[in-house]
Image: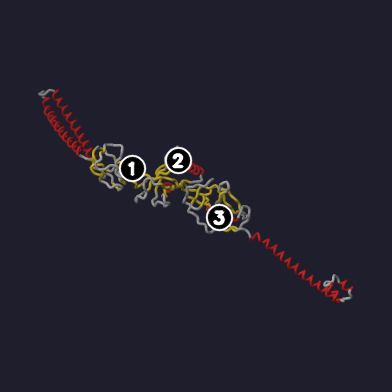
Amino acid sequence: MWRFASQQNEYPRTGVQARRRGDVGFGKDQMKNKKQVWRGAAALSAMALALALAGCGKEQAAPQANKPQVGVVTLKSQSVSLSTELPGRTSAFRIAEVRPQVSGIVQKRLFTEGGEVRAGQQLYQIDPALYQASYDSGKAALARAQAQLRTAALLVDRYKPLVETRAVSRQTYDDAVAARDQANADVLSAKAALETARINLVYTKVLSPIDGIIGRSLVTEGALVTANQSGAIASVQQIDPIYVDVTQSSVQLLRLKNAMASGQLQQADGAQAAKVTLMLEDGSTYAEAGKLEFSEVTVDPTTGSVTLRAVFPNPKHQLLPGMFVRARLAQGVANDGLLVPQRGVTRSQRGLPTALVVNAENKVELRELVTDRALGDQWLVTKGLAAGDRVIVEGLQSVRPGIEVNAQEYQARAAAPAGQGGQAPAAK
């Protein structure tokens, strides 16, 4: 009966039901099973509690472990030598256009086109026949005038004692003195004419007025040239040293003067202030340093710029007139300059330069900046940052203002030399 009943009720509900069936032993087994169930439930509860506590611990540790790690640069104020790059063009130190000073036929060209010539070197030979004849005629006229002077002088010497004895009238003596003086004047005139003829004869040899490089000849042998003609027959340019004329906008000049007046900049020392370096069209730096000669005192009304002139040694003739160059001029010294790596400066939607800074609470702050110019791979910042600020330069993509970060000093920063200035200023 029990076996049949147990098959129908595999799991009796209570011990009372078992007792009703008259099987007391089954009630003891049931109580034993209940104890095992409760023990298993207690063990499961303990495990669940342990897991819950462990989860809470992880949740509490998670914020600390999930702080973004960023690389920062701690700013330090320093003296920064500022310079500016200005566009310019080279021009010859001296230019001499060669023109004939007498008329005639060109007999010879005595130079190599494009070669070096010296001052006083003969360049052309103009037919001298006519001028030689004029010179010879002048010599003859001088000799005749000198002979007449001697005759007039002898007559005066002869009349002088006679006029004292009244053997010759005073009038005759005065006429002799006047004739002598006139003959003397004729001699002087003949000498001047002879000198003119000699100069014209010399001018048949066309000479170089300066040292330099001569260009192509604009006349050939057999060409007729005239005295003081409008067109040059050749041109000589002295290019060692050579000038570099650069232009600076009046706005830049005003900013520089205002910075000097406000104390943001101190004027560079004498030798450094006049020093100029040159960048060529291919991007290379010219080996020779130049110096600033002068600055124009007026602003060009058509361009709004001021012209400055520098002079450079050019012994190898590497610089040629008309080349485009960029000149770097010293402007002054910023005593408390702040240099910020360019990788740490971004642009806002309004186009303003900004930087992310880690404050004392290790939270990220957004700062709007005012930058002056680029110095190598850094910005010179004039507003928005201070010495001691920690600027984020690495990990910018993983942070935003207001969150807490784990800041580490950025060791791989390669700072540009403070004395090398750029031209392009940042938007302010």
Reading the image, the residue beneath label 3 is: 393
- Is 9 in front, or is 172? 9
The answer to which quarter of the image holds residue 149 is top left
Q: Can the viewer see residue 268?
A: no
Vertical placement of 227 versus 11: above or below? above
Residue type, numbered disc 1: Ile
- Give the quadrant of the N terminus: bottom right
The quarter of the image holding the C terminus is: top right
Is 4 left or right of 249, judged from the image as shown? right
**Which of marks 1 and 3 precedes in the sequence?**
1
Q: For numbered disc 2, what is the local secondary structure? A: strand
Residue type beneath disc 2 = Ser
What is the three-letter code of the residue carrying label 3?
Answer: Val
Q: Which residue is mark 2?
A: 305
Q: Is residue 21 visible?
A: yes
| Foreground pick, 353 / 111 | 111
What colour-coding does the image apply? Answer: secondary structure
When the figure is inspected, residue 395 is found, relative to residue 106, above or below; the finding is: below
Q: Looking at the image, tell me whether mark 1 or mark 2 is earlier in sequence order.
A: 1
- Judging by the rendered image, the residue that carries numbered circle 1 is 95
